[in-house]
Image: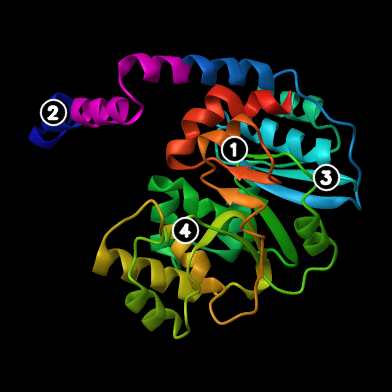
């Protein structure tokens, strides 16, 4: 009880104040939020031509909170892509009937994997009795669903994109991979963002961990993921070095450890684009993480329209 009270009275306001300061103060934080809301409204008008079975599939984990970002990412890719695409949207647990109708209207022919079917699949292929830690993380750490919900009980190659990205040119390298996948596809981070030490990750994976991997765009072959290892790795890493926002990214780096990789050209697939690049895009892909979120909301999405 005292812990909850201390959080509400002290820690939560302090965290919110630090977030405001990080955004350049109260006025700038308000400006960013106003632009974000404008983006959210603009996303409702986006739509693409109908897709069909047999088109190249692009996967997203999404829901009510992030749908507007997903819509912009998928729309921007459709605008610059020279091959037919079919989008597969995995419900993060927040889809309702209205959002399903909206998704089907904006992206006709797309596939929605609803939470009921996902939970049914998990009960069979990733039962809580055998994988208790992964099921615990699904409740408190939604990012883990990019692995569990998308890949468990599945087969074949899948390319999963984060929602907070925009495409400005045809991603030829990514499309080539979709047409002929032979090894995992990832993009490169601006800095190493695993949180966990290389020593720990490599001791568990028993292989060398590639640096700078970013899972904003990640292609994996579902049936090759060893869920017994993922359960053990995640539990051990958290016990030894704490919980982290980057757990799913670290686990992904361990999954692909020791394999030949197809890496998006760092000059074209840009994680953390600088303000100047966001204002006048010249690259293929922007992944708006950390400080670049400000310019994503203020300017980035407007370039798509």
Residue 106, can we see it?
yes
Which comes sooner in the sequence, label 1 or label 2? 2
SS for callout 2: helix
Say whether marks 4 and 1 touch (CB < 8 Å): no
Q: Quadrant of residue 167?
A: top right
Residue occupying the far left of the picture: 2
Using the image, determine if residue 266 lies above or below residue 237: above
x then y, percent, for residue 31: 44, 15
Viewer-side label of 4, 1:
1
State how far apart marks 4 and 1 are (Cα): 28 Å
Mark 1 to mark 2 CA distance (whole Å): 38 Å
- Labels 4 and 2: the sequence-earlier one: 2
Give the side of residue 69 with respect to residue 51, left or right.
Answer: left
Of the numbered discs in the image, which one, if any, rests on residue 277? 1
Instruction: Give the magenta part as a residue range.
Output: 12-33
Q: SS of the residue at dot 3?
A: strand
**3D distance between C-alphas at marks 1 and 3:** 29 Å
The residue singled out by tag 3 in the image is: 86
The residue sitting at 49% across, 64% down in the picture is 212
Q: Locate residue 3: give its quadrant.
A: top left
Which residue is painted at 44% across and 58% down in the image? 191
Is the N terminus in the top left, top right, bottom left or bottom right quadrant? top left
Mark found first going from the N terminus, 3 or 2? 2
Depth check: give the residue in front, 261 or 57. Answer: 261
Q: Earlier in the sequence, mark 4 or mark 3?
A: 3
Q: Nearer the viewer, mark 1 or mark 3?
A: 1
User: Could one spot residue 110 in this view of the protein?
Assistant: no
Cα distance between the residues tagged 4 and 3: 25 Å
User: How many other residues sit within 10 Å of disc 3, few (<14), some (14-19) or many (≥20)?
Assistant: many
From the viewer's side, name the closer residue of 305 and 115: 305
**What residue would you read off at disc 2?**
10
């Amino acid at each position: 009880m005292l812990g909850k009270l201390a959080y509400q009275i002290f820690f939560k306001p302090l965290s919110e104040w630090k977030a405001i300061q990080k955004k350049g103060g109260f006025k700038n934080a308000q400006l960013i939020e106003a632009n974000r809301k404008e983006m959210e409204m603009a996303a409702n008008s986006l739509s693409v031509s109908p897709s069909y079975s047999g088109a190249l599939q692009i996967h997203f984990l999404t829901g009510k909170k992030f749908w507007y970002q997903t819509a912009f990412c998928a729309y921007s890719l459709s605008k610059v892509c020279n091959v037919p695409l079919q989008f597969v949207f995995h419900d993060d647990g927040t889809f309702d009937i209205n959002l399903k109708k909206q998704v089907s209207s904006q992206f006709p022919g797309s596939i929605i994997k609803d939470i009921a079917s996902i939970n049914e699949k998990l009960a069979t292929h990733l039962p809580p009795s055998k994988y208790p830690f992964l099921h615990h993380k699904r409740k408190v750490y939604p990012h883990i669903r990019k692995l569990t919900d998308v890949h468990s009980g599945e087969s074949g190659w899948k390319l999963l994109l984060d929602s907070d990205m925009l495409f400005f040119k045809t991603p030829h390298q990514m499309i080539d991979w979709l047409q002929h996948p032979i090894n995992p596809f990832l993009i490169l981070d601006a800095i190493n963002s695993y949180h966990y030490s290389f020593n720990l990750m490599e001791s568990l994976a028993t292989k060398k961990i590639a640096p700078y991997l970013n899972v904003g765009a990640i292609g994996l072959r579902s049936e090759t993921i060893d869920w017994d290892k993922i359960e053990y790795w995640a539990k051990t890493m958290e016990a030894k070095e704490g919980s982290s926002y980057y757990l799913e990214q670290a686990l992904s780096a361990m999954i692909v450890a020791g394999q030949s990789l197809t890496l998006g050209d760092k000059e074209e697939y840009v994680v953390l684009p600088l303000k100047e690049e966001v204002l006048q895009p010249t690259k293929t892909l922007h992944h708006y993480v950390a400080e670049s979120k400000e310019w994503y909301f203020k300017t980035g999405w407007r370039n798509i329209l």
